[in-house]
Amino acid sequence: MRDVVTIIGGGPAGLAAAATLKPLGLQVRVLEQDKSVGARWKNHYDRLHLHTTRKMSALPGLSLDLTGAVTLPLFGEVALPGKDGVIHNTFAGIPDVPLERFDLAFTGGTTMPLTLKKDVCRGVRQRVQGTFTGHNGTIAKVSTPLKVAGCPPVVTFKRRGHRLTVRITAGRDGAAIKSATLTAPGAKRRSVKTKQTITLRRLPGKKAFRVVVKDTAKQSWTLKVKA
Ligand SMILES: Cc1cc2nc3c(=O)[nH]c(=O)nc-3n(C[C@H](O)[C@H](O)[C@H](O)COP(=O)(O)OP(=O)(O)OC[C@H]3O[C@@H](n4cnc5c(N)ncnc54)[C@H](O)[C@@H]3O)c2cc1C
């Protein structure tokens, strides 16, 4: 009589054990209390996806192949240029799961800085392109609009006589403007609102105005603006 192995539970471990034992000539019986095998996984939350690599998630006799279109939404923030005028940043990865937890190679590496020389706060929004290589060699190319953090607010003045129209707008991807204070040489410091027209008794000649802008994310900028 052939040996019979009884496995309690038809989850991944039970099924893997059964798949390994059967080729050895053993009779395997899997007892599952639920209506179907893999019941735990079927009853997890809707958005469930493997966080282990495909290699690590494979079961005996079941390899997970990467086939068809692959999309990996890129998400990262790029800070403004430092003193050297070049933007340096570490790419954050993809939503929910850090990139390095996948068996993926990111061109530039997962911790390599992105280097940009353009002013990403103005003009047409740039895109970031990434190429990912899955552990099985499948390549996924992703292109995503570049999101930036830390762009300064934009302050513009229009001068007509002693009247100034002040326009203050949040920088690209920046938080809403909370307050702004205008300092003009020879004039009182005063708070200003966006699109406000103010009258100053004395207007400075070629000297610049100083505007301190605070946003709702508690960031503060001191900007010099010529009228
Ligand atoms: C949200 C979530 C995400 C996860 N993501 C991953 C991942 O990405 N990669 C990974 O490797 N692991 C992941 N895990 C862990 C994963 O659950 C385990 O790796 C895997 O399910 C373990 O398999 P198992 O067969 O040991 O247990 P289970 O999947 O729990 O299976 C046990 C089975 O035994 C049955 N059973 C229990 N008692 C009895 C009984 N007395 N009689 C009969 N049947 C019984 C149960 O009904 C069940 O079907 C995740 C877990 C959770 C909760």
Image: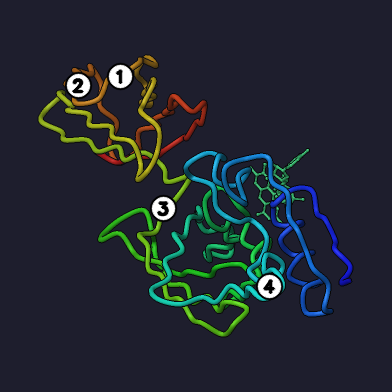
Q: Secondary structure at mark 1?
A: loop
Question: Marks 3 and 1: which is nearer the front?
Answer: 3
Residue with the most extreme bottom position: 137
Residue with the most extreme front position: 1
Q: Which residue is under mark 2?
A: 196
Could you say which quadrant of the image residue 92 lies in? bottom right
Number of numbered tags placed on the structure image: 4
Lower sequence index among marks 4 and 1: 4
Q: What is the distance, in whole Å, between disc 4 and disc 1 at their CAs?
A: 59 Å
Q: Which residue is under mark 3?
A: 147
Q: Nearer the viewer, residue 14 or 64?
A: 14
Quadrant location of the N terminus in the rendered image: bottom right
Identity, as a three-letter code, of the amino acid under mark 1: Val
Q: What is the distance, in whole Å, between disc 3 and disc 2 at their CAs?
A: 29 Å
Identity, as a three-letter code, of the amino acid under mark 3: Lys
Q: Secondary structure at mark 3?
A: strand
Lower sequence index among marks 4 and 3: 4
Identity, as a three-letter code, of the amino acid under mark 4: Lys
Q: Which residue is under mark 1?
A: 192
Question: Marks 4 and 1: which is nearer the front?
Answer: 4
Asked if labels 2 and 1 touch by Cβ distance under 8 angstroms, the answer is yes
Q: What is the distance, in whole Å, between disc 4 and disc 2 at their CAs?
A: 61 Å
User: Where in the figure is residue 6, as x and y percent of width and height?
Assistant: 82, 55
Q: Which residue is under mark 4?
A: 55
Q: What is the distance, in whole Å, between disc 1 and disc 2 at their CAs?
A: 7 Å
User: Where in the figure is residue 157, as x and y percent of width and height?
Assistant: 22, 35
Which residue is at a point 47% across and 42% down the rendered structure image? 46
Lower sequence index among marks 3 and 1: 3
Asked if labels 2 and 4 touch by Cβ distance under 8 angstroms, the answer is no
Q: Secondary structure at mark 2?
A: strand
Q: Nearer the viewer, residue 142 or 109?
A: 142
